[in-house]
Image (cartoon, rainbow, N blue to C red):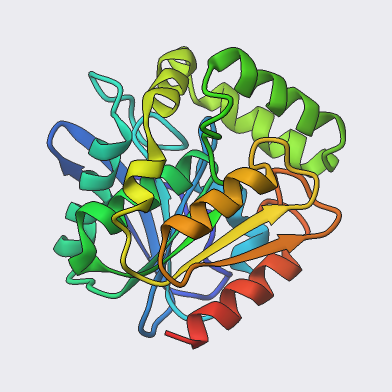
Amino acid sequence: MPERLLAPEGTPAVLTEFAHAGAILITEDFGAGTHPVVLLHGIGMGRSVYVDLVSRLEGRVIGVDLPGFGEAPEPARTLTMERHADLVAAFLRERGITDAVVLGHSMGSQIAAEVAARHPDVVSAVVLAGPTVNSAARSIRAQAGYLLKDLIGERPEVIWRGAREYLRGGPNLIRKMRATIVHRPEQAYRRVRVPALVLRGEDDPLAPPSWCHEIVSSIPGAELAEIPGHGHGTLISDSSEAATLIRSFITTL
């Protein structure tokens, strides 16, 4: 059985394994209210990286371990971003959710965009945090270089959480990274028709300003917010400003 990782002590949580089309999600669902926030993590991560953010959110929250990450078992084949999106959407339909705020960080932002583009019936809004992959630097070498550059200035808790989850991610990270890089998120952004909030840390080399502005220009009515003093891990530690922006965004829905 999956572990309780996000729900505050004393808060009832529903922990499930959801299987669909040969892949399994682990989900932790707690809280109540409309517009549940669905948390999609980045590559090599898991839902546990959102502990700090969750402590600052309100209402219903659903943390997700994507296939082969966190507590979710490795699928027989590495999923594309589109297949990840179909899996998340199938889970939301199974739960009867039609108004999710899908929040994705890094690789999770690519999946969030695909959920909104491919399955608008389950989504009310998206939050794209540290969105990847910059169309001007679409290679494993470039992305790995940006990640190393970001880690040099990151907070210790971000490095620790990231290292722990990368180790849990298993030996298939290169294949998973290729799946993120061959994806063309700009094609999904052009089809998103729900409210969108784009978040970037001021010092995030993986989500440069030019790329974030390109995303905002592709999604009608999208908003861009920059968080001073943060890099790519802006949702992982000291997430107070990001949480404030997210809560404010949700109140407008």
Q: Is residue 60 above or below residue 203?
A: below
**Residue 199 position by quadrant:** bottom right
Q: Position of residue 29 (x, y in %)?
A: 38, 65
**Residue 203 position by quadrant:** top right
Number of numbered markers? 0
Q: Quadrant of the N terminus?
A: top left
Q: Is residue 46 above or below residue 227?
A: above
Q: Position of residue 141 (x, y in %)?
A: 61, 13
Q: Position of residue 145 (x, y in %)?
A: 70, 19
Q: Position of residue 113 (x, y in %)?
A: 37, 52
Asked whether the viewer can see residue 56, the reply is no
In the image, is 149 to the left or to the right of 25? right
Q: Nearer the viewer, residue 12 or 33?
A: 33
Asked whether the viewer can see residue 198, the reply is yes
Name the residue at 57% across, 69% down.
Answer: 8
Q: Quadrant of the C terminus?
A: bottom left
Q: Nearer the viewer, residue 86 or 10?
A: 86
Q: Is residue 71 above or below residue 13?
A: above
In the image, is 203 to the left or to the right of 67? right
Name the residue at 84% across, 39% down.
Answer: 156
In the image, is 87 to the left or to the right of 81? left
Name the residue at 31% across, 66% down.
Answer: 193
Name the residue at 50% across, 45% down.
Answer: 41
